[in-house]
Amino acid sequence: MSKRRQERMSVEIMRVLSQIIQEEIKDPRIEFKNLSITRIDLSNDYSHARVNISILGDEIQREEAMKALQKAKGYIRSALAQQLKVRHAPELEFRLDRSIEHGIRISSLLEEIKEEAKGSNE
């Protein structure tokens, strides 16, 4: 399969998954405003998709949201197949992505350093 087609399919899966999670999943443990799909890694044969998800909140909220996604995985996969109009949707593997959390932490540390530098210059 071509790399370009694989990338387009990944983008489309990301769009549809976001829509499904936002509009169709009613589990209170999943708050879409705190959840972001950061990346989809799709296998060459489209049979597996690794879905990287960033969840803002404390560790308990992250664990609960991941459990809810795991529980709804079958429904999400069938809804994905239906909306993509494909016979076989990829097997979904949800993974917690902490890159946004690390970015926020680095930004706050840089801001602290900036404030300290201003304080020492005065």
Image (cartoon, grey):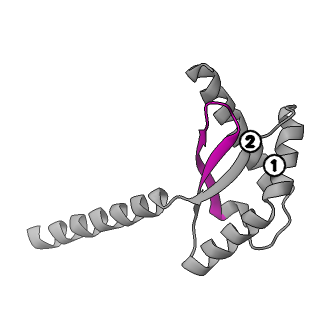
- Residue at left 69%, top 34%? 46
- Residue that appears at 82% across and 69% down: 27
Q: Which residues are magenta?
A: 34-52
The residue indicated by pointer 2 is 90
Amino acid, disc 1 = Arg
Quadrant in the picture for residue 90: top right
Image quarter where the C terminus lies is bottom left
Q: For mark 1, does the 10 Å Cα neighbourhood hold few (<14), some (14 to 19), or many (20 or more) residues?
A: some
The amino acid type of the residue labelled 2 equals: Pro
Q: Residue at x 16, y 73 (%)?
A: 119
**Above or below for 86 versus 48:** above
53 relative position to 86: left or right: left
Look at the numbered discs 1 and 2 and tell me whether their residues touch, using CB distance below 8 Å: yes
Q: Which residue is mark 1?
A: 77
Residue at the image position 63 percent from the left and 74 percent from the top: 63
111 displayed left or right of 100: left
Gap between marks 1 and 2, in whole Å? 7 Å
Q: Main secondary structure of the magenta part?
A: strand
Badge 2 element: loop
* 60 up-or-down from 30: above or below: below
| Most foreground residue, 88 or 99 | 88
x and y percentages locating residue 91 in the rendered image: 73, 47
- Figure check: 122 above or below 35: below
Check if residue 35 falls in the magenta segment. yes
